[in-house]
Image (cartoon, rainbow, N blue to C red):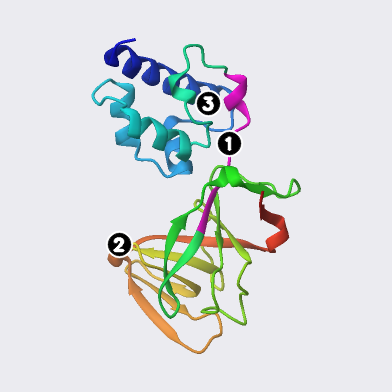
Amino acid sequence: MSTTELFERRRENLSRIIDQWIASQRFKTGKEICEYYGLSATYVAQLLNSKRQIGEKAARELEQQLGLKSMSLDQQELQIEQVKNTLVPHLYSMQAVEQELFCLKPLNAVHYEIEPTIQLQANHYAIQINGEAYAPTLKSGWWLLCDRQQSAQTADWLCIQFINKFCLILELQRETEQELQCQSLDGKRQVRFQKQDVQQAEVVIAILHPEQIQRR
């Protein structure tokens, strides 16, 4: 098989996978799939429109991000059944930066088992607490389940990600058109942030114990 033919096969298989997931009604659009798996919608659109070639490295990275078996995109006859049930939520761990400040470190969700009673939607993701920065309120090993779409209300906990990619977990006190007014989870510190400095602020909807999301 020529390199060009392999690129085209990967593109067709990626397109089939996206179409299957939309047909299964787990997602409404390709953009929603990209947001769910942390992919750039523009990048994926370029791959699907043949504006970019899907090379070896890109193919393996896509499979990993989408929770697919390695080499799935290279199959001559992609077995759709293999990809119907691979939908997994975003899982992250906290990568400490300084005190309570952290970055989100993506985890390979295929290595984790989620308790069946937890109803996860495409707009959900979970962050595992590492270290004692948020103790005693949050213990190391616990998970925070966040919702990308839920509107924040006063007293909600938020995962705030700034434009520099650093994050904080804070309690919302007040929101205005220009800023977020928050306090630390222990209530000891008040802080304000200009919205122009915030990339996203998403509501924590549940705290999960380690046994509810376990490494396989």
> Which mark identifies residue 163?
2
Q: Closer to the observer: label 3 or label 1? A: 1
Task: Give coordinates of residue 160: x percent, y percent.
Answer: 43, 66
Report the amino acid beneath label 3: Ile
Q: Residue at x 49, y 24 (%)?
A: 72
Q: Residues within 10 Å of mark 2 (few under 14, many from 20)?
A: few
Is residue 185 on the magenta stretch? no
Residue extent of the magenta highlight: 80-92
Q: Residue furthest bottom?
A: 188
Estimate the spatial distance between the alpha carbons at disc 3 and disc 1, rounded to whole Å.
Answer: 12 Å
Q: CA distance from mark 3 to mark 2?
A: 31 Å
Provide the residue designation for mark 1.
87
Q: Secondary structure at mark 3?
A: helix
User: Which mark is in front, 1 or 2?
Assistant: 1
Question: Quarter of the image holding residue 20?
Answer: top right
Between disc 1 and disc 2, whose residue precedes? 1
Asked whether residue 136 is in view, the answer is yes
Q: Which of the 4 image quadrants contains residue 56?
A: top left
* Residue 168 in the figure: left or right of residue 50: right
| Residue at image mark 3 | 22
Alpha-carbon span between mark 1 and mark 2: 28 Å
Question: Is residue 151 at all visible to an observer of this figure?
Answer: no
